[in-house]
Image: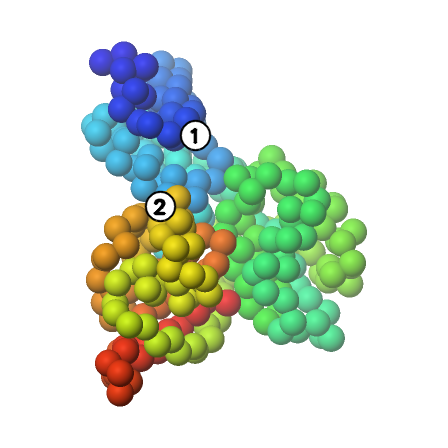
Amino acid sequence: MTKQEILNEYKKPEDKILLAQVLDKINFSQTKNRIQNTDFLDMYQVNLVESFLKKLDIKNYILTGGYENSERKILLIYPEKYDYNMINKNISNILKVIRIKLPDDLVGKYTHRDYLGGIIKLGLKREKVGDILVDKNGADIIVMEEISEFLLQNIGSLTRFSMSNITLEVINNLRKVEVRKEEIKIIVSSLRLDNIVSELAKCSRNKAEQILNTERVFINGQNETKKTKQIKQNDIITIRGKGRFEIKEFVGNTRSGRYIINIEKYV
């Protein structure tokens, strides 16, 4: 099949653009014997690309965000002659960490939104930034090497970070940050996904269905659009733009038969 014939199987223009870029990187890697990489991919794009590579029977690739279980990842395509050490060295060259340590009077006051908002305010593209690992003392921000110096020099110009200690770290020095969660409780009429999304995103059922149709919902890392999908205990639901949630416990039912569910929201 030609490149165009392969891409014609996909309907969305943005999917075609991304996969055309992946095909170009595969071709370049194979003909030039060099490692190629994409920018950061979100969960939908990771699933799309991984499925695409399997369809093409491409095996020489890695999807990584710099640590195990990362949400945002880059794709590395490499020639067969490369071994693990060579690939790992390239990851270290491609991904860097901007570490922000907050002053004592700001400890515990900033969330993921504050860090990401600051980065966007500087005019940086989202695809150049990976996961932002937040704890009460600050954050480790995984970024593409090409923007690391700019971010290092400029993020301190933002008022919210002007008194923080900001350093550039290698990806292997990424901190193990304890995930912060808050407990919430929801009550739903059924365990259908659209019901759950409506409660978690604080929106109507019609809006929840729109969110599903625009492929913004993931269950345990897999994109899900079926509104009647039944949710199970320990499922992790990610709603792009709204957050990540874990179904911890089905507590019981109300007198009217509605389900009471304990949720842990990642913050």
Task: Name the amino acid, label 2.
Answer: Asn
Residue at image x 33%, y 27%? 11
Foreground: 191 or 149? 191
Question: Residue 213 bears which disc, if any?
Answer: 2
Residue at image x 52%, y 59%? 133
Q: Is residue 158 left or right of residue 46?
A: right
Picture quarter with the N terminus? top left
Question: Residue 14 bears which disc, if any?
Answer: 1
User: Which residue is at the far bottom?
Assistant: 255
Residue at image x 46%, y 72%? 181
Q: Is residue 78 left or right of residue 192?
A: right
Q: Is residue 29 visible?
A: no
Check disc 2 and report its element: helix, strand or loop.
helix
**Residue 250 pos. (x, y %):** 26, 78
Q: Is residue 252 left or right of residue 39?
A: left
Above-or-below relation of 64 to 217: above
Foreground: 54 or 258? 258
Foreground: 71 or 11? 11
Check disc 1 and report its element: helix, strand or loop.
helix
Above-or-below relation of 133 to 14: below
Q: Quadrant of residue 113?
A: bottom right
Q: Quadrant of residue 264?
A: bottom left
**Residue 24 pos. (x, y %):** 39, 19
Q: Earlier in the sequence, mark 2 or mark 1?
A: 1
Q: Is residue 76 visible?
A: yes
Q: Quadrant of residue 153?
A: top right
